[in-house]
Image (spheres, rainbow, N blue to C red):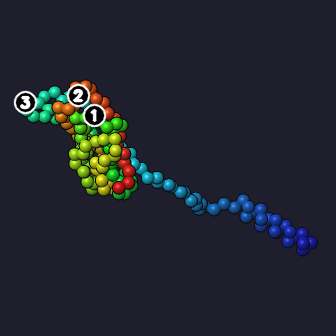
Amino acid sequence: MKRLLTLAILLFGLTTTAYAQSNVATQEVEINVSEINVIAVQGEISMTISQATAGQAPDAATDAGTYALTTNGTKKKITAELDEDMPTGLTLNANMSAPSGADSKGKKSLSDEAVDLVTDITQVRGSGLALNYEAVATVDADPDTYKRTVTYTVTSN
């Protein structure tokens, strides 16, 4: 009888514990923030070199767009490169204004090799930032219409 009573108490205790609930619960939540480096350019760029002063090189042509940037990284830079070099006698320059805390490298000639336009970018977001272009021709530039694709990349310094 003692065994039966002990077994009944034991079973009742386990059954009660199994169905008991607490008024407090916890759950571990993991959040992974990836490095984000995004850039977008706006504006349709078109320049025409059509004038010169007698005895001088043709007048340069300019146009402007804007760009937006978001990065949560540190020590980033923006580079630019052309899909193919410019022909003889024609140069395409670009200049990007720097977002807060970064450094603009000023006007740079673009080619099919990446060139730094903005450096020392750290955790910033900005939009409507100036992006200026200048086309410069010499008399060696053949009259024609030239199109190039400029690729902007956010990368590490």
Within 10 angstroms of label 3, few (less than 14), some, or many (20 or more) residues?
few
**Percent coordinates x, y for residue 67 in the rendering:** 30, 41
Q: Amino acid at mark 1?
A: Pro
Within 10 angstroms of label 1, few (less than 14), some, or many (20 or more) residues?
few
Q: On screen, 24 above or below 105?
A: below
**Percent coordinates x, y for residue 100 in the rendering:** 26, 53
Do we see residue 25 in this rendering?
Answer: yes
Sooner in the amino-acid sequence: mark 1 or mark 3: 3
Q: Amino acid at mark 2?
A: Asp
Sooner in the amino-acid sequence: mark 1 or mark 2: 1
Nearest the eye: 87 or 76 = 87
Looking at the image, which residue is at 72% across and 59% down?
A: 19
Under tag 1, what secondary structure? loop
The N terminus: image quadrant: bottom right
Determine whether label 1 and label 2 are within 8 Å by CB. yes
Q: CA distance from mark 2 to mark 3?
A: 18 Å
User: Can you identify the residue that label 2 sits on?
Assistant: 142
Tally the numbered discs.
3
**Percent coordinates x, y for residue 88 in the rendering:** 25, 35
Q: CA distance from mark 1 to mark 2?
A: 9 Å
Looking at the image, which residue is at 9% across and 34% down?
A: 56
Determine whether label 1 and label 3 are within 8 Å by CB. no
Do we see residue 62 in this rendering?
Answer: no
Q: CA distance from mark 1 to mark 3?
A: 23 Å
**Percent coordinates x, y for residue 123 in the rendering:** 35, 55
Sooner in the amino-acid sequence: mark 2 or mark 3: 3
Q: Amino acid at mark 3?
A: Ala
Q: On screen, 65 above or below 101?
A: above
The C terminus: image quadrant: bottom left
Which label is found at residue 87? 1
Looking at the image, which residue is at 59% across and 60% down?
A: 25
Which label is found at residue 54? 3
